[in-house]
Image (cartoon, helix red, strand yellow):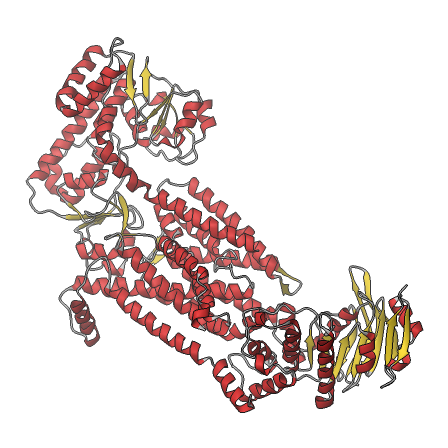
Amino acid sequence: MTFLSVRTLLYTLFSVIFIYFFVFCDNQENQNDFSENLNNSELVNIQTQDKSETQDESETQDESETQDESETQDKSETQDELINSYPFELIDSSGETIKFTESPNRIVAFDSAALETIFELGEGEKIVGTHDFVAYPPEAEKITRVGGAFNMNIEAIIGLNPDLVFIFSDQNLNDLRNAGLKVLYIESLNNDFTKISDEIKMWGRILDAELKAEDIIFDFENRLKNIEKAVENINIKQSIFQDVGGLWTPGPNTLVGEVFDLLNSNNIAYDVDGYVQISREIIVDRNPDIIITLDIESITKDPAFNDINAVSNNRVYSLSSDALSIGGPRFIEGIEELAQLIYSENIDSFLTTK
Amino acid sequence: MNKQIFIQRKKNYLYDNFKVYWIIFLSFSLLLIGCIAVCIGSVNIPILELIGIIYDKIFGYHNSNTNFDVIIFKIRIPRVLLAGIVGFALAMSGATYQGLFRNNLADPYLIGVASGAGLGATIIIVSPLPIYFGIINVLPFGAFLGAISCVMLAYFISYKSNSLTLTTLLLAGIAISSICGAITALLMIGSDPDIRPVLSWLFGSFTSARMEHVILVLIYVIPSFLIILGFSRYINILQLGEDHAMLLGVNIEYVKKALIVSASLATAGAVSFCGLIGFVGLIAPHMVRLIWGTDYRYLIPLSSLVGAIFLILADLIARTILGSSELPVGLVTAFCGGPFFLFVLRYQMRYRFK
Amino acid sequence: MVLQLRDINLTYNQNLILSNININFNQGEIVGLVGKNGSGKTSMINIINGLQKPTSGIVSYNGENINSMSIKYRSKFISVVPQKINFPTDYKVIDLVYMGRNPYIDFFHMGSNEDLEITYDVMEMTNIVNLSDKLISEISGGEIQRVAIAMALNQRSPILLLDEPTSNLDLVHQVMVLDLVKKLKNKYNTSIILSIHDLTLASKYCDRIVMLKDGILFAEGKPLEIFNQQNIEDVFEAKVRINKDPLDDSILVIPEII
């Protein structure tokens, strides 16, 4: 009896500690991201290498690239168009060099953003497997599911016989590599949504669809510029609060937080790091003009929120899609929807609707 | 020793003045700590303004600053009250289970309350049904139903030929707990990857405390407390063993049923609105036992008060330590309660207070 | 004739523990149950106090079946000092002795002055008044036995059952406990049923002896009549010599060393 209870105690303690880290891993990742920003840009920029170039030289080249990014980016773009051929090499988030000698034909895309990008590039039929929670695009319905982030079914992945496995977290990286698979591991974006275009470019390079990728990036950046233009003359900043469930909200250094900055609105969670559960007192005190939530009634029916601007002006909205939670090509649609919710008809003329 | 002196002394002892004074003292400290907890929060309200708001509220004046008004009356006061009542209920049922099972390591979640409530809540969160049914949040009711059905199942399994075997009840509770835990994990794995709401529920949180919750929990806690207090003398006698208690005229079947039902009801009621808060139900009775001794007539009210004070303080830390964001209160109870408990265990305070 | 056992049979897992027991106990007598270990003494005590229901037969107190009484009501008539008591170590002596008043205290009550007076009397009688503030973990085995007896006496019942009250005690404490029992009988006219292994002590203190052998009532009667060599050798299957105490004519049982 005593033994059982002691075990229960220990079990509780361990699970508390485990889940604590699990819940707050986002924060830690974000902090890392800041330091790895340089690194990240290095990863996503495609490294074209002549066979004569040695590894050391490429590293020194990387350093120079980060120092004046714009120049080298232009250079690499022109190089891409000129060379446009295999083989080429990529350095992924684990520091591994991945060599591509031809366009992969059987891809396991273990990431919603990557999957959407590949479909957008028109290469969707090359995906043979993905994770359990993919909901978009509809064509992805038929793709074999190989588990979730915490229960990846490695045997099933091997059984699909892929020639490229793309993952966004390094949880199963070594297992997959040990199984002899070619694994590309790029950490999923937690901030700086302008990097989405870099990822699209990377996929265009890998799948030999660079022209298509350029189109998508052009469209993405064009629409982004339109929105920037639309909001730059707006002087009154509206405060905004996004509830992603249970009053968890994105801070400034997240993808969504940056979108709020772009849209010239004040995120009421300006003093937090990553995703946190914000206190109700703070919401009442900072009095958001707009609330974005999953479940509108959970806000409007809360007696404490009766008097805040968003509720009394009927400006509690929920987004129509999950576009803002996935850093893929569809992200711009999410930004546009948000812009429309904030500025309503004032902004319509600036938006390029499809 | 003279008979009259003996009787007078023992009378004082039986109506233990010393401990009665402690109960009064703790009640006042509970009140004081509650008031302090209302004054402190992530939004800083100056103390003079706070007194002014309360003064205005009592005498019916309308205050101009509605924000502070809402924060105090619709967020902080319900929250502090709920934390106090939940701490009270958990410590009370922890003490009851410890007495009933004659095991100092028993806690209020022993016979499947926690895992049942967890399963109920997870089913509600995972299912496609909305969490808000009209204006009523169905999550607490799911949790309550889960908790009660698990306890009932354990109860009927161990109820055999008109008597309740406590050892079987304990073992059945553990088995049912692990089954429910497994189902909960299964549901979580198979559901949307964003399980932060479930997690913050599993760790306990008073974020969404409202006055209605306070009243609903009180409906369970007050009758349970009265029943348990009335039976506390029988818990003392039960310490001699069931057979001996029966020889002393205690109808143990009746006592066991009443105690299990009321302790489980109080726990389920508490758990359903704020999630699983560990350690309170274990630590509070233990501390009281080490300081004031085992007599359950005093142990139960004293540990209930200590539990209430402890949880109000833990919640105060949970909602203020991270500035504008919140920490699950279960983490605070584990991190503060664990080491403090070890300290108390090391320096058996009992001898100082006697 | 306070307590009657009529046609008591007890089987447990198809083993016959007690068979066809018929005994009457009278007001104000001390009855000693003797027999080998496993002969059914404890089972009989448990049947009398209602913890164990007999397979067949009736135990009646003043014509009332004790198994149909409520637990609280029954505990006003029958009190027991069990063979093994697991006292919780964290309680004071006074707390435990006061627990004996439980049948007389109502739900939500603490007990009256009268309960305290009775408790004092009982503690004085068992000579533990000076221990009243000590914890159970601080007192000796003989004192614990006296606490257990005080607890049973506090029930103020007309019948007191003692299951091997003298085992694990030294000679002085054995005599002290049995003197107490005798005092009780003289003072309150209580009927006392005790199981005991020491036949010499049994013959000195008991008014009547009941001999059990393998669940059967082997012999019953005054100690002088039934403590003869034949009976004792049959029941205990051991060689003994019987002597008479020259002072009070009680029986001395001396084991033969082979």
Q: Position of residue C4 (x, y in %)?
A: 79, 80
- Toward the right, the furthest residue is C230
Q: Quadrant of the C terminus of chain B?
A: bottom left
Q: How many marks?
A: 0
Answer with left or right where residue C244 lies relative to residue A299.
Answer: right
Q: Quadrant of the N terminus of chain B?
A: bottom right
For the point 55% across and 81% down, the residue is C106
Q: Position of residue C101 (x, y in %)?
A: 60, 81
**Quadrant in the picture for residue A37:** top left
**Quadrant in the picture for residue C215:** bottom right
Q: Position of residue C251 (x, y in %)?
A: 87, 79
Camera-nearest residue between C67 and A240: C67
Answer with left or right where residue B194 lies relative to residue C105.
Answer: left
Q: Is residue B5 above or below residue C219?
A: below
**Quadrant in the picture for residue A162:** top left
- Toward the top, the furthest residue is A52
Q: Is residue A259 above or below residue C86?
A: above
Q: Is residue C94 above or below residue C86?
A: below
Q: Position of residue C41 (x, y in %)?
A: 78, 70
Residue A183 in view, yes or no: yes
Camera-nearest residue between A170 and B298: B298
For the point 13% across and 35% down, the residue is A227
Answer with left or right where residue A210 lies relative to residue B140.
Answer: left
Residue B266 in view, yes or no: no
